[in-house]
Image (tube, rainbow, N blue to C red):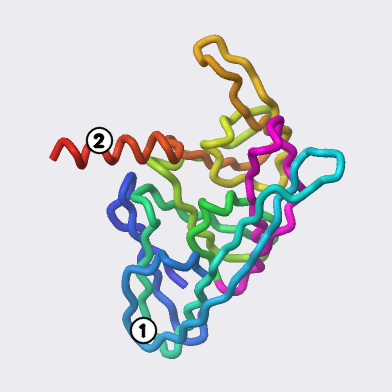
């Protein structure tokens, strides 16, 4: 499997070349085009996120439709793009776990294992949840983000506002904290990462990115 990112930065497109019997697992609804002899199959995954109450009641569930593309000869192409315009980056995994925010997952090599089942993240507010995916094995993972995606090589400690998180290597430990910052009226939720490993973040968050795009469209 070979991946090429076209039109990089805030409006990326991924072009994936598949040879015979190679597979690609993508988030459903991200396909732009295909070329060649390709088999297609769609699956469904579901995860439940629990609240912080004493009875650990389920307050939200998130599902993920996945589409598997399998090359049936040696010359096949799959073109992907995020549902909302943004950046795509490729991360190569070699026998360790990458933890990805489910909304930031675009695709991965079909030989890899993708599953829900991350230890539950407890938020200060029981109405807020974050669904994460685990990816293990060897291969390439395509991550999507709002605006641009940037990489941090964490050595000791790094803090991220939760809405800007994309993915992180499992070697990093994390803790959710709610902090009051003087230039914000309300406390904000951050994730504190410690240890050594790679961390991916996005420059924008959903609501503000949508407002920015709408403003630009309206001005035209």
In the displayed image of the protein, which residue is found farthest to the top?
Answer: 182
Image point 33% across, 36% down: which residue?
211
Residue 68: horizontal and vertical position, in percent? 51, 76
Q: Give above or below for 171 relative to 183.
A: below
Residue 176: horizontal and vertical position, in percent? 70, 32
Question: Tag 2's secondary structure?
Answer: helix
In the displayed image of the protein, which residue is found farthest to the left?
Answer: 220
Q: CA distance from mark 2 to mark 1?
A: 42 Å
Judged left or right of residue 159, residue 104 is: left
- Quarter of the rendering occupied by the C terminus: top left
Judged left or right of residue 187, residue 36 is: left
Residue 166: horizontal and vertical position, in percent? 54, 45
Judged left or right of residue 218, residue 65 is: right
The image's mark for residue 84 is none
The image's mark for residue 215 is 2
Question: Tag 1's secondary structure?
Answer: loop
Q: Give above or below for 19 relative to 199.
A: below
Taking the magenta stretch, the answer to whether it contains residue 134 is yes
- Camera sees residue 125: yes
Residues rendered magenta in the picture: 110-136
Image point 47% across, 39% down: which residue?
202
Label 2 vs label 1, nearer the camera: 2
Image point 49% across, 53% down: which residue?
143
Q: Residues within 10 Å of mark 1 (few under 14, many from 20)?
A: some
Badge 2 or badge 1: first in the primary sequence: 1
The image's mark for residue 75 is 1
Residue 64: horizontal and vertical position, in percent? 57, 63
Q: Give above or below for 190 relative to 183.
A: below
Q: Magenta-highlighted stretch: main secondary structure?
A: loop
Taking the magenta stretch, the answer to whether it contains residue 130 is yes
Judged left or right of residue 6, residue 125 is: right
């Amino acid at each position: 499997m070979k991946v090429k990112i076209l039109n990089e930065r805030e409006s990326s497109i991924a072009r994936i070349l598949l040879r015979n019997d190679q597979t690609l697992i993508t988030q459903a609804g991200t396909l732009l085009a295909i070329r060649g002899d390709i088999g297609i199959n769609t699956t469904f995954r579901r995860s439940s996120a629990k609240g912080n109450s004493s009875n650990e009641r389920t307050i939200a569930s998130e599902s993920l439709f996945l589409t598997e593309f399998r090359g049936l000869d040696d010359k096949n192409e799959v073109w992907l793009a995020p549902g909302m315009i943004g950046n795509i980056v490729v991360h190569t995994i070699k026998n360790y776990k990458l933890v990805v925010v489910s909304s930031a997952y675009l695709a991965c090599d079909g030989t890899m294992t993708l599953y829900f089942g991350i230890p539950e993240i407890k938020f200060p507010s029981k109405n807020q949840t974050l669904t994460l995916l685990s990816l293990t094995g060897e291969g390439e993972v395509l991550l999507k983000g709002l605006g641009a995606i940037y990489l941090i090589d964490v050595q000791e400690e790094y803090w991220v506002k939760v809405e800007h998180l994309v993915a992180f290597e499992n070697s990093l430990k994390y803790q959710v904290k709610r902090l009051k910052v003087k230039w914000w009226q309300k406390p904000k939720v951050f994730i504190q990462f410690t240890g050594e490993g790679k961390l991916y973040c996005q420059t924008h968050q959903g609501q503000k990115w949508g407002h920015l795009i709408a403003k630009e469209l309206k001005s035209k």
